[in-house]
Image (spheres, rainbow, N blue to C red):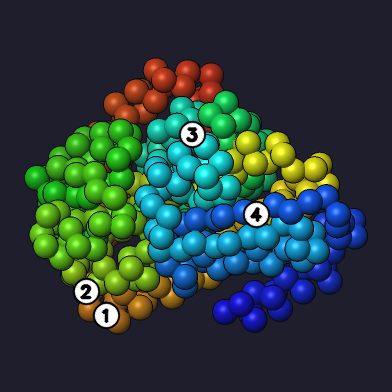
């Protein structure tokens, strides 16, 4: 895997996408501990290893990067808190969890709005609102480097969920995110927050009946071993802000800050491409493993959007109408 990533980085350098300045040295030693709860084969982990290669090569090893995957350094919430304290320097938690720390990030929890990858890319990589949202993280001791692509969250379950009515009373694992909990309650389910690192066991033991995650996580976490069905609901398009400890970032010389940002930009673009390429593959592999795929009808999707309007209303109360309207307008323009 590392060999492939190094080859990719070399091609990016040839294309002129890496920092244009020559590598600098002599500014001291800095160590970045980077964490994700996802497994080594996930696009997120692959991009963190790519980030490591770019940053170390461009600083002649003055900055070293250690990558910890599969939740080795704790849950997503724990990773965020560790970044605030500079016990961890870099993390890629789900935006839903980040929204517990930075209220403007709750915009990305609006249900059934951002439903297309190309639109999501325009908004969260190209549109000016991207930097506006990331800048709010400074207020909570973090630096937002980029939004990486995680993909659309889909529902997996023991029993078949072919329509909205089948959600009634279903015990669905969610992250400990108020907007997600409210979303599933509005749809008639019984949401239960469980840490991702404990999720497989909870599904296996029947603590919950269902869970929701993008295709890559459904397959790479082997949820097909304990779940029989996938329902494509399109309720939340999930991204992972690449966050850095502000205490650590502020200590870096300006030229190293630029290298870190450029590296984040490069791996972000690669991850959006990689996730898009692999989504169909992971879906096909889930089907090969015996999972049945169901789809909500257009009528059910429209009814779901109507039922979850109170979630949007609550986000408006917390974030403010102006920012919500700006975001919704940007999404509609991108569509």
Residue 247 in the image, given as x and y percentages of width and height: 63, 36
Q: Earlier in the sequence, mark 3 or mark 4?
A: 4
Q: CA distance from mark 2 to mark 4?
A: 38 Å
Secondary structure type for disc 1: loop
Q: Earlier in the sequence, mark 2 or mark 4?
A: 4
Q: Is residue 94 left or right of residue 130?
A: left
Using a 10 Å C-alpha cutoff, classify the residue at mark 1 as few (fewer than 14 neighbours), some (14 to 19) or many (20 or more): some
Q: Earlier in the sequence, mark 3 or mark 1?
A: 3
Using a 10 Å C-alpha cutoff, classify the residue at mark 3 as few (fewer than 14 neighbours), some (14 to 19) or many (20 or more): many
Image quadrant containing the N terminus: bottom right
Residue 270 seen in render? no
Check disc 2 and report the residue beneath it.
225
Q: CA distance from mark 1 to mark 4?
A: 41 Å
Check disc 1 and report the residue beneath it.
289
Contact between marks 3 and 4 (CB within 8 A): the answer is no
Residue 315 in the image, given as x and y percentages of width and height: 39, 25
Contact between marks 1 and 2 (CB within 8 A): the answer is yes
Check disc 4 and report the residue beneath it.
31
Q: Tell me the tag on residue 52.
A: none
């Amino acid at each position: 895997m590392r060999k492939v990533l190094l080859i990719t980085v070399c091609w990016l350098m040839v294309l002129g996408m890496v920092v244009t300045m020559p590598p600098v040295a002599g500014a001291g030693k800095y160590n970045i501990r980077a964490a994700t709860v996802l497994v080594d084969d996930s696009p997120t982990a692959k991009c963190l290893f790519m980030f490591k290669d770019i940053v170390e090569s461009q600083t002649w090893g003055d900055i070293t990067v250690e990558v910890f995957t599969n939740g080795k350094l704790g849950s997503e919430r724990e990773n965020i808190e560790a970044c605030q304290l500079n016990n961890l320097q870099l993390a890629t938690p789900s935006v839903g969890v980040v929204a517990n720390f930075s209220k403007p990030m709750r915009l990305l929890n609006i249900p059934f709005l951002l439903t297309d990858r190309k639109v999501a890319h325009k908004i969260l990589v190209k549109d000016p609102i991207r930097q506006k949202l990331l800048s709010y993280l400074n207020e909570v001791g973090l630096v937002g480097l980029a939004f990486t692509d995680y993909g659309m969250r889909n529902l997996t379950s023991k029993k078949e969920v072919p329509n909205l009515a089948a959600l009634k009373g279903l015990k669905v694992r969610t992250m400990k995110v108020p907007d997600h909990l409210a979303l599933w309650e509005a749809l008639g389910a019984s949401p239960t927050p469980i840490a991702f690192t404990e999720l497989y066991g909870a599904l296996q033991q029947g603590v919950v009946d269902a869970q929701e995650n993008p295709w890559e996580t459904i397959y790479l976490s082997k949820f097909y071993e304990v779940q029989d069905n996938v329902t494509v609901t399109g309720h939340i398009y999930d991204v992972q802000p690449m966050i850095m400890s502000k205490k650590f970032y502020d200590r870096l010389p300006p030229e190293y800050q630029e290298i870190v940002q450029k590296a984040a930009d490069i791996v972000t673009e690669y991850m959006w491409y990689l996730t898009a390429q692999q989504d169909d593959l992971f879906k096909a592999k889930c089907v090969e493993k015996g999972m049945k795929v169901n789809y909500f009808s257009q009528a059910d999707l429209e009814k779901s959007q109507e039922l979850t309007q109170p979630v949007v209303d609550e986000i408006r109360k917390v974030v403010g109408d102006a920012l919500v309207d700006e975001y919704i307008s940007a999404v509609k323009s991108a569509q």
